[in-house]
Amino acid sequence: MDFDALYNAGFDALDSAVDDWSRLVRNLTSLEKDARNGLQAQANRADWSGINATVSRQFVGKTAGEFADARTQASSIRNILRDTAGELRSQQRKLKDAIERGAKNNLTVTQTGGGGFTVTMRVHPDRAGRGSTPPDHGEAEVTRLRDEVQDILEAATRSDDSAGEVLRALVNQSKHGFSGASYGDRDSAAKAVREADALARLAAREPGSLSNGDLDRLSAGLKRYHGDELFAARFAAELGAKGTLEFWAGVNAPEHGITTPSDPNPALAREREKRFGDLQQYLGMTLANATQSDSAAMTDWKRDMLQLGDQPVGGRQGFHQGFQVMSSLMRSGDYDDRFLQQYGERLVAFEKKHGEDGKAPHLWQHLGHDPRLNHTGTDAGADPFTGFMKALANSPDAATSFFGDTFQTASEAGKGTSVSNFDYFFETRDWPHDVDDAGKSSTAGRDMMAQALEAAVTGHPAGELPTADTPPHTKEQAKLMEQVVSSLSEEPKRLLDHRYTADSVGQMMAEYMPDVHRGLGPGQSSDPGLYPVAGTAASLSQQDLTRVLYSLGQVPEGYASVLAGQQSYTANLMEYHFRNPDAHVNDANFKDMEKLKTSIEAVASTAGEIQGTTSAGRAYASEDAAGAKDAQFNSAIDKTKAWATTGVSIGIGIGASYIAGPAGIAVGGLAGGITNELLSGISQGSLRDSTDQAVFRRGEQLDETEQSTYKTIEMAARGAGEAAGNRSPHIEVSAVSAAEKGFGSAQDNVKRHLEGLGKPTGMK
């Protein structure tokens, strides 16, 4: 910074800017609150239908989120400006104090050309007034003052330059909208940028020269800053797409210390490899955050990464394709949807070309001497679709888009219809053999594909719960759910031969409970009053649902998800009808209690059918010598209780947020308590029915399961009536009778719909 600029600086304009940004922050904070508590809250409670249920409601949610990002960015800019103004004021005071001290030694500081300065004698002794003797000074005092002024100017320059750098970086993060990066002062933002540069330089070094200490520093830095948007984008851009691939492939190369059969120092190699799990995780999360940036540098990074996917990288001979290296880093974090879509398109095209449309699984086959790219323990990372599917599991919109894309056109497939990515990856792909860290066959590929499907059909990341802000199901999500159910009905082995995917499939079924009820209820799919659905309803046939529910019932995790989702949905739906008796039967010839009785009986009947179908599958599994036993089922139920007690229950929070009803009455408090009570009894054997028999204590006894079903339906009806302040013991009794009919229908449907798929057992 120029000497004159700092010495004569006025801060009125900067102070005014800080005041303006502070006022903007206050206004945006108020707008954000109004958007969240007003606009979005009303949108979540509204009885949307048609396109408004998805497009408009989702737009409202994103708009509310933009207010939050705008407030965050405005706060960061205000804080950086305020901090910079304070620092420049401090440097200006130091400069003037230094000049005043110099004057006492007869020294003065004057401006020179080009913004510089010089320290000279203030008054020469020969020109001093008569009787006046100027203070004496030596060369040391001149040098000391000059150095002090120079240090002050350099500090002011750093403050000014770093403020400009981080402000530009902050604004450039997003071409449209606002950045979510938050900083309390200029120093923290500047430090993040400096650390990004330092770590990028470290990662760009020759992999073989990186010590264990270097790897520890990288891991610690990425762990600390991976959530910082400025850091992430700066680190990725400075390292570059090629540098990113070369770093990860390089440190995993055998010549750099990774254990291989020929490694002469296995102990040292194992010590080094211990660091790779955390490094992989935090590097992946940093890159994911970076892809959310729209800066010019990150736009180049994403373009380059797509182009490098089919290029060999790593080691002296190029051990891997770029796709394999990058996909191994995609297992953590939320990657940009557009980047994932483009990456998926190129990866699929590569497999079609070099893998003979999936007929050559050796394309991604992991061989014993190949270095491992993945250090999560599940697989070696040879198949790039494994890591890519995990990325999709964290990015629902990208997952929905990917599975709906075309893998082969009708002409390419040589048949009358095209083949979608869902058809290929879920049904026909020959997933390459891989091994986990213990040397056992890996199931990670298909498992992560199931997680990606879970995200694709539910609209939220796999393994997470829907919230009040989760939009209703879209047309694309509902269509994909139809394909999943149809495929598993056509060939149950797609689930039963890969039982580790049942938790994801069970979650899908739980979150589509309104659609499941519609599909099972005869003639009820066209009756929106009984099972109202926000957004697009999935059209699911009774035959397909029966087959899939029966299969899920044989796997503890699938059984537990369906059971808890059904209990939660039934309890909430009954409460809805208790509060809105006209919702289903709107006939002036019927009294309200008659209308309510009709609705509750219909709900109870379908609930009984769902429990009867899944219980038949559980009974079969319990009778099978190789099947799961009650302890495993109850353990899965116990784990599933966690989400059943949340404010937004499975089957209600998603695709059923309409449950507030036309009157705007919010329900959902009932299901948490009732469902928790039911599941506690189911899993612990502590809940007893009228015959003093433990509910679901012995799953292999279908009679007891049947009685338990009636008891839980009765409890749901009673709890719903009490929650609505309109309890009816008469209706509770009729609900039990209806559930009995539904349970009986399940037995008939299982026998009828499973013909040709093997004789079902576990039936009366």
Image (cartoon, helix red, strand yellow):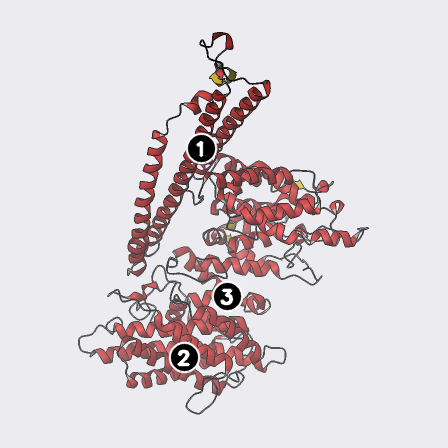
Q: Residue at x 56, y 48 (%)?
A: 348
Q: Residue at x 25, y 72 (%)?
A: 580
Q: Are dots 1 and 3 in contact, CB under 8 Å?
A: no
Q: Which residue is mark 1?
A: 90
Locate residue 14: give its quadrant: top left
Sequence-first tag of 1 and 3: 1
247 relative position to 716: left or right: right
Q: Residue at x 61, y 60 (%)?
A: 444
In this view of the protein, can residue 749 be seen by the observer? no
Query: Where is residue 708 shown, x and y percent of the image?
Result: 44, 84
Query: Where is residue 548 shown, x and y percent of the image?
Result: 49, 70
Within 10 Å of the Cα at label 2, are there few (<14), some (14-19), or many (20+) other Cα atoms? many
Q: Which residue is mark 3?
A: 505
Q: What's the residue type where badge 2 is placed?
A: Gly
Which residue is outermost to the top? Answer: 126
Give the number of the mark in front: 1 or 2: 1
Q: Which mark is residue 608?
A: 2
The residue nearer to you, when weighing 611 against 254, is: 254
Sequence-first tag of 1 and 2: 1
